[in-house]
Structures are given as structure tokens and as C-alpha cells.
């Protein structure tokens, strides 16, 4: 089967985050199952030569540019991608669109629908009811027709299923599809060092400033522990750096900036605990990746993975307060036995529950 997967933005520092990692993981697993898969999308930050493959997955990348400033990724477009799609799409059996409210993926769906080329949509929690002045006309003319024209619309959580129905109606062919994570080369459990890691975009919803405040609250009790933020700035960077500069006299806290997508597993594997203080995070790949490496996780109860983390026992789920976050991380740092138990539980669940082979089989069945 020939499959084309479309994403909004590919960049060397992984600024678009989880949806691109999901698309690449799916593509690699499908290729290992014998299918021919290509990932296409907008690109920026590569200079003159964007890559033609990633980890064995062929890429077709086209320059992305911002045509509506001030609204983040939603203002991106990639005209050359749309032109290429009209020439190449008929050579594929199905197109898998990793869609958001943007001017890369939604125009692709619009053209495919009009051309009668079968496509499926996966929204990663990025399309929900909105009263934004930009979302209202976009939904009316593009988003709803794109969702309704899809042969399948994949959702991650019950909340996302309800949101998609609220946006586009109850006639959608909705199917549950979990995110998975490739088996790492090794999962040795939490690192022997003592680092608490935040690895995500520095965006307001992900609350990197709360991570900094947590680190400062724990510094006196854990003087040998380092607290590190890794990820590209998406608005919160200057405030985070000001907090660090003003309060961290001991040098235990740092922001390393963005990281290449291919380096995330190695970076996660060096952490003693992974902390993601986001609220309303649909299904974060970074949490799944940390689990697969045997690293305990601390997340909030509004995260889509909170029920699984609680059930598996691979971390601690907290409410959205600073006090709860401080208490959870302190609990992990104080108890080596608990830490290693959580790590083993996460690694085991990643193999048995979040493996990519089952996801590739589910995708191939839906495509057929």
C-alpha cells in the first residue's frame, strides 16, 4: 500500500513537537510492515537543503512561511506543497493528514476532498470548539468540510472525540487511535545522575515558569539535583530566563534551548525524572518516550495520559498547583526504590501497551 502522510511543519529543532514525531513513528512502523510511506510537509530552519529522509522514512519538504503573523503555527502556509500534492497525490492509495487549524494541512484536505482522493485525518487534540474570530470562518469554509470528507477521523481521547463532534457534527467516522512509541535500544531505568527534566516547547499552556518555580522550591532540600528545561521558545522563553537569572544563584537551573528530534531519546535517558506541568495536554509523546526509557514521569490530571500513568504506576499525577508539583517531584527524588519501580513499570507498559506494531496494523486496516 502507498501512503502519503502530511504534517504542518518539520524543522531541525522539532518546534512542531508531537504530531511530527507521531507521523514519523507511524511511517517507520508501516514501512517495516511492508508499506510504502512518504511524509510531506512544510519546512523551515534547514537552510538551503531540507533533508530527504529521516530515520529511513522518505521526506518531501517544502518551504513554509508565515502569512498571518501573531497566531503561531496557524499562520503558516506552504504553497509549493499544495502544488506538488496536486501532481503526486493520485499515485498514493490513501493520504493521512495530521491536521490542525492551519493553512498547510486544511487546504490539502480541501483539495483532496474535491479531487475525490481518499484521506484520513488525525488532529492530535488540536481542533476543538472555538469562538476565535479567525476560527469561526475557517471552520465554516474549511475545517468542517475537511473533517466531514475524511474516510476516518482518528481521535486520542474521549475529550477529543467529543470536541470533534462538536466542531463538525456526529456523522464523522470516528475511530480511536492511540499514540505509540518505538522500542528504545535500551531502557535501563532512571539515570544514576540526579536531573529533573522538562523537555517541551516553552509555551504558556505547558507552564515552563511553573517548572522553574518548582525547581527553586526544591533547591535547598536537593542541593545536588539539577533542573533543566530543553525546548524551543514559543513565547515563554524570556520570562523563564528572567526567572532563572533572578533567582538561581546556585546554578542548578538552566534552559538549554531547542533539541533536534533525533536526540530526544538520548536526552530523556539521562534524567532521573521527567516533569511536564502542562494543562489540557492531549497525549504528549514526550511522556510516552520517557516511559519507554524507564524514566518516571510527573504530569497533571488534565493530561490525556493521566489515567494510564495512574493505572500503570509509572509516575505521579498531580493537580495544577505548584504545591502538588513540588510534592510529587520531592517524593520521587527521596525514594530510589519507588523511582526504579516506576521506571520498570513504564518500560514494560511501553512494550506491551504502546508498541508501534499494533498501531501500524490498526492504521493499515483503516486505510484498506
Image: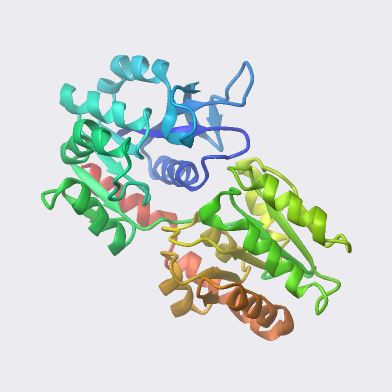
> Can you tell which quarter of the image residue 107 is in?
top left
Colour scheme employed for the rendering of this structure: rainbow
Which residue sits at x=29%, y=46%? 131
Quadrant containing the N terminus is: top left
Q: Is residue 243 visible?
A: yes
Q: Nearer the viewer, residue 322 or 46?
A: 322
**Image location of residue 192, percent across then percent down:** 78, 70
Quadrant containing the C terminus is: top left
**Image location of residue 158, percent across then percent down:** 28, 63
In the image, residue 110 sits, relative to residue 311, either above or below, namely above
Tell whether 134 sits left or right of 191. Answer: left
Tell whether 93 sits left or right of 184. Answer: left
In the image, residue 98 sits, relative to residue 305, either above or below, namely above
In the image, residue 138 sits, relative to residue 343, either above or below, namely above
Q: Nearer the viewer, residue 350 or 224?
A: 224
In the image, residue 105 sits, relative to residue 355, either above or below, namely above
**Image location of residue 180, percent across then percent down:** 44, 56
Q: Nearer the viewer, residue 134 or 9?
A: 134
Tell whether 28 sits left or right of 136. Answer: right
Identity of the residue furthest to the right in this view:
250
Total of numbered circles in the picture? 0
Q: Is residue 191 visible?
A: no
Which residue sits at x=31%, y=14%? 87
**Image location of residue 327, percent across then percent down:** 64, 80
Amino acid at each position: 500500500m502507498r501512503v502519503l502522510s502530511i504534517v504542518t511543519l518539520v524543522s531541525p529543532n522539532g518546534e512542531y513537537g508531537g504530531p511530527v514525531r507521531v507521523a514519523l513513528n507511524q511511517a517507520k512502523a508501516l514501512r517495516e510492515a511492508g508499506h510504502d510511506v512518504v511524509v510531506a510537509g512544510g519546512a523551515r530552519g534547514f537552510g538551503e537543503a531540507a533533508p530527504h529522509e529521516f530515520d529511513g522514512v522518505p521526506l518531501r519538504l517544502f518551504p513554509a512561511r508565515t502569512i498571518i503573523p501573531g497566531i503561531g503555527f496557524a499562520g503558516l502556509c506552504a504553497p509549493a506543497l499544495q502544488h506538488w500534492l496536486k501532481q503526486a497525490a493520485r499515485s498514493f492509495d490513501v493520504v493521512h493528514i495530521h491536521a490542525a487549524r492551519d493553512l498547510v494541512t486544511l487546504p490539502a484536505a480541501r483539495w483532496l476532498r474535491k479531487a475525490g482522493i481518499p484521506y484520513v485525518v488525525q488532529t492530535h487534540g488540536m481542533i476543538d470548539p472555538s469562538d476565535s474570530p479567525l476560527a469561526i470562518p475557517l471552520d465554516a469554509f474549511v475545517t468542517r468540510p475537511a473533517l466531514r470528507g475524511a474516510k476516518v477521523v482518528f481521535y486520542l481521547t474521549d475529550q477529543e472525540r467529543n470536541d470533534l463532534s462538536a466542531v463538525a457534527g456526529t456523522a464523522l467516522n470516528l475511530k480511536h487511535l492511540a499514540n505509540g512509541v518505538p522500542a528504545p535500544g535500551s531502557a535501563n531505568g532512571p539515570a544514576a545522575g540526579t536531573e529533573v527534566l522538562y523537555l517541551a516547547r516553552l509555551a504558556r499552556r505547558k507552564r515552563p515558569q511553573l517548572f522553574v518555580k518548582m525547581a527553586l522550591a526544591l533547591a535547598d532540600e536537593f542541593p545536588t539535583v539539577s533542573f533543566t528545561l530543553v525546548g524551543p521558545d514559543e513565547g515563554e522563553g524570556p520570562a523563564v530566563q528572567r526567572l532563572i537569572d533572578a533567582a538561581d544563584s546556585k546554578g542548578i537551573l538552566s534552559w538549554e534551548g531547542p533539541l533536534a528530534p533525533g536526540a530526544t531519546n538520548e536526552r530523556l535517558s539521562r534524567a532521573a525524572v521527567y516533569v511536564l506541568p502542562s494543562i489540557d495536554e492531549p497525549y504528549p509523546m514526550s511522556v510516552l518516550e520517557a516511559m519507554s526509557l524507564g524514566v518516571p514521569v510527573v504530569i497533571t490530571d488534565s493530561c490525556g495520559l493521566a489515567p494510564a500513568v495512574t493505572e500503570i504506576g509509572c509516575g505521579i499525577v498531580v493537580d495544577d498547583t505548584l504545591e502538588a508539583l513540588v510534592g510529587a517531584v520531592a517524593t520521587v527524588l527521596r525514594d530510589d526504590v519507588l523511582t526504579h519501580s516506576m521506571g520498570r513499570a513504564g518500560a514494560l507498559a511501553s512494550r506491551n501497551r504502546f508498541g508501534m506494531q499494533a498501531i501500524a496494523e490498526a492504521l493499515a486496516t483503516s486505510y484498506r
